[in-house]
Amino acid sequence: MRPTFRPIEPGDGDALHAVFTEPGVRQYLFDDILLSRDETRAHVEAACAHGAWAICLDGAVVGLASLRPTGVSDRELIIAVSERCWGRGVAYEAAQAALHHGFEALNLRRVLAGVDLPNQRSHRLMARLGFVAIGDCDGPKYRARHYELVRPAGPSPCQGMA
């Protein structure tokens, strides 16, 4: 089954807390820190404020796709998907939809992303999406690689957010 997307709602907090606290998700997304429900609520409120999307399978929230504002005009791609959905193309489809929205609806010139160096799954996702590495830096727990995807010329091959 293919994922569907809808705007994040405050009521998604419990489902996203379950995703954010899975060991494989929190290892890189939150530097292996186990979030409290209040911390998750703050992340959900921020996601609501900038128009993030819930990633759903069979009507259940299994993750989050976001183009988080960073800097004056840039957005950073954030994808968080439950471990039970890994290896099924869910993160790729969510990222494609978010990128399409960013380039077509938000008229972004580029989208940024950051990936902890040990997170090989996310590095493969960046390559598959066409991101280009633009540098490394120290992070709170791991060194991270920064990526950039520049707005493609011509029509976008990506699908939009439903």
Image (cartoon, rainbow, N blue to C red):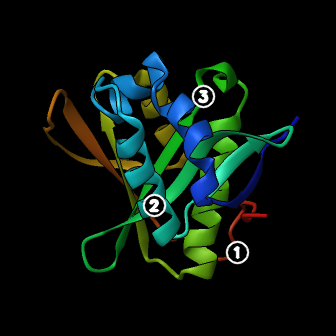
Please name whichever residue, 78 or 18, is drawn nearer the observer in this view of the structure.
Answer: 18
Q: On screen, 136 above or below 113?
A: above
Identify the element where label 3 is drawn.
loop
- Horizontal relation, residue 114 to residue 50: left or right: left
- The x and y percentages for residue 135 are 20, 46
Identify the element where label 2 is drawn.
helix
Q: Earlier in the sequence, mark 1 or mark 2?
A: 2
Residue neighbourhood size for the residue with mark 1, other residues' Cα within 10 Å, grouped as few (<14), some (14–19), many (≥20): few
- The x and y percentages for residue 111 are 42, 63
- Horizontal relation, residue 127 to residue 144: left or right: right
Q: How many discs appear?
A: 3
Assign the C terminus to one quadrant of the image. Answer: bottom right
Residue neighbourhood size for the residue with mark 3, other residues' Cα within 10 Å, grouped as few (<14), some (14–19), many (≥20): many
Amino acid type indicated by mark 3: Ser
Q: On screen, 83 above or below 127?
A: above
Location of mark 1 (residue):
155
